[in-house]
Amino acid sequence: MKLPIKVDITNAAPEVASLDGVLDELNAANKALKEGTCPGADFTGWLKPDAIVPDSELSRVKAAAERLRPSTDVMLVIGIGGSYLGSRAVIEALAEDPEKVMYLGCNTSGRYFNAVKKKLAGKRVAVNVISKSGTTLEPGVAFRLVRKLDNCSIKEILVTTDARKGALLEIAKKDGYETFTVPDNVGGRYSVLSSVGLLPIAYAGIDIDALVAGATECAKACDAESVETNPAYRYAGVRNLLYRGGKSVEILASFEPCFHYFAEWWKQLYAESEGKDGKGIFTASADFTTDLHSIGQFIQDGTRIFAETFVVFEDESSDCVVPEDKENIDKLNYVAGKDMNYVSDVAYRATAKAHRDGGVPNITIRLASLDERTIGAMIYFFEKACGLSAGLTGVNAFNQPGVEAYKKNMREIFGAE
Amino acid sequence: MKLPIKVDITNAAPEVASLDGVLDELNAANKALKEGTCPGADFTGWLKPDAIVPDSELSRVKAAAERLRPSTDVMLVIGIGGSYLGSRAVIEALAEDPEKVMYLGCNTSGRYFNAVKKKLAGKRVAVNVISKSGTTLEPGVAFRLVRKLDNCSIKEILVTTDARKGALLEIAKKDGYETFTVPDNVGGRYSVLSSVGLLPIAYAGIDIDALVAGATECAKACDAESVETNPAYRYAGVRNLLYRGGKSVEILASFEPCFHYFAEWWKQLYAESEGKDGKGIFTASADFTTDLHSIGQFIQDGTRIFAETFVVFEDESSDCVVPEDKENIDKLNYVAGKDMNYVSDVAYRATAKAHRDGGVPNITIRLASLDERTIGAMIYFFEKACGLSAGLTGVNAFNQPGVEAYKKNMREIFGAE
């Protein structure tokens, strides 16, 4: 089958005219990932997407989703960072009703908790609490609060945590909750294709087998030692050359609002993997055309610090066609009869050219369509390219020492007050 | 009354230890705004927030909101950029049920349109279409599509547009829709306290008199020729000194998710006002603590390009208290009995210190509480500081020439295909 991902680097020239100069570095990074000689190599279990979850656990994931979908109105996911961003990315992009999944434990806001609580009133609720340790502040506090909820009916609590140790595992055993595994060899931001992501995704009615199959299929293509055919090589190579050329911010832009949380997932993946030792290209995102009427002015004309990556979907129909209007007072008949996907495609082409002309080198990731296979492939593509990119940047892609600084300060303040 | 805004610049030192050096520039920028000698001076009507909307129109805004709130289930706002970001910012921050207002015409996605259409099924709908010209692609197409909706009941269409000319005014006259005014002397991104923003805000049940009163009160404080007492002077001064010192990205961070769209409004305000002529500090935003588990690593430890501005609310209670747990398996009893607003405050202090220690100079904007008066004051504060800041940067704060580039390309592509 044809890979549903293409990386078009035409608009990265003249800054990046060829990737040949980084092929050796990419090969070395690829080899270090595969052979487990890169820094943080204990956390590269995601390299084999069909081996992350054992069959027996995958069956339990599907069984839980099938049991709870008809018997509950909503799943409440309790987690922060990599414990929910992957599932939310996939659910917002693909689920028929993304609002069947709600999120708690991803901030410290009491107002937010109260707003979610209000929405839960009278509902039948499945809870999936996700934490490797069970002692992280935000999800831990949310779990305490959720167990006291009295305005809805909690039908079942599912726990995704460490397989052998930790506070959350202990609570699950004590209270008899079914448990799923946060794998030891996959860090949070790479965990979407483990039970961490797959359980909420399956609950949302998405075909997780197709998702994992798309990733597995992509893994092969992302292993080729070629800057022509390997999409991960192409993306990792270009963004590093742009970074070395002085670009300090990469904007991931899409024309589909349902891609918003995928960009949030991407931001964590790259920012946490590369943003260390005073290095890295900062990850920002944009929802176009919305943001063309906001930060668009700055991207076009402000301080020249940007690389830009467009994500476009090539399916042709959105089942939404611009109506003809005989009077044409608004002078918009030039788009009458067009599907909105075509209008978005024109907007993308117009923007890529305008930004290129304005001094923003850009990359386009072309995806076949918004479906499980493509999204699975895209997950693997971005993860693999991230591992390679960190290799080129010279950092450990799999740790996050900087996240500890504010946590340490919090413990000190709580201890002192 | 005490102004509900304080700008704390302690953590901007040592990069910015004093603002005395920019006082003359701030005074000059302030004078140019007031006397109408700055570039784009025709668009400074927002400087007098209580004079933007004539009393007769303000009465009609309130009457429409009072009429439609009980008789409809949802208001559909059709607009893009400044035509909806201001109202959405205020509604998400303050409305009891922000979902009573929905948004269309802010992108080109057919999928998005179909998703909103599905949510409208069976509902009684008030429509407010907002466009100065009526020929802008996104809202124009959305308005065409909305007039064809057959799955909901459109009770009334309200039009906010130019008072004297344009396609939308013509349509309104022909079809007998009540009209409200997009003022000539206020640009889109400064228009939230005109009918553009006030009509949806009033529909959402928010006290628009208090909002405007808060802004008016703040106008006086923001006029003082003092880097000690004038919050707009302080903020504009610090961010420009940090920009001159080499910072290229400013992150606006809050610990309240309901502030998310306020940050979106801020991003447009500053990016469109300052991001031109190859200048400006790029505007990004973060929702903490969510994003501390994502881009937090990069902010703490990655490439040193950041200034950061925290927005914190000083009200003490969120009506959400962490429960005690006698077993304390999760080891979180150290926060038991605390209101979540206190936990957020500790998270803020811990983060501001961690980022300062990590080389990110930061500013804190302290707000008395999340209410109309404070939000109104904050709107004026940010607008005035933006006008001053653009003066210091040496750009016209009130045009947006870069927004035309992709639009021109779109017209060419549509013309050729």
Image (cartoon, coloured by chain):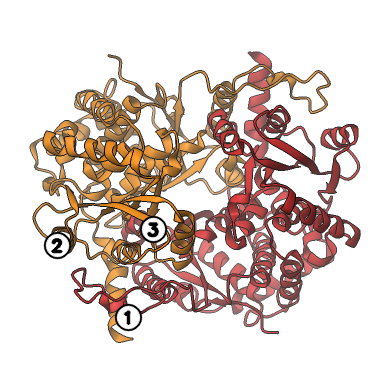
Chain colours: A orange, B red
Residue pictured at 75% horizontal, 67% vertical: B212
Question: Which image quarter holds the N terminus of chain A?
Answer: top left
On the image, numbered disc 3 is attached to which residue?
Answer: B290
Where residue A345 appears, as percent x and y from the top left, is 54, 24
Is disc 1 in the same subunit as disc 2?
A: yes
Q: Please report, as a chain letter, where disc 2 is located.
A: A
Q: Mark 1 touching mark 2, by CB under 8 A? A: no
Q: CA distance from mark 1 to mark 3?
A: 20 Å
On the image, numbered disc 2 is attached to which residue?
Answer: A174
Q: Amino acid at mark 2?
A: Lys
- Would residue B155 appear left or right of A75 to someone viewing this image? right
- Would residue A187 appear left or right of B214 to someone viewing this image? left
Disc 2 secondary structure class: helix
Q: Amino acid at mark 1?
A: Ile
On the image, numbered disc 1 is attached to which residue?
Answer: A413
Question: Which image quarter holds the C terminus of chain A?
Answer: bottom left
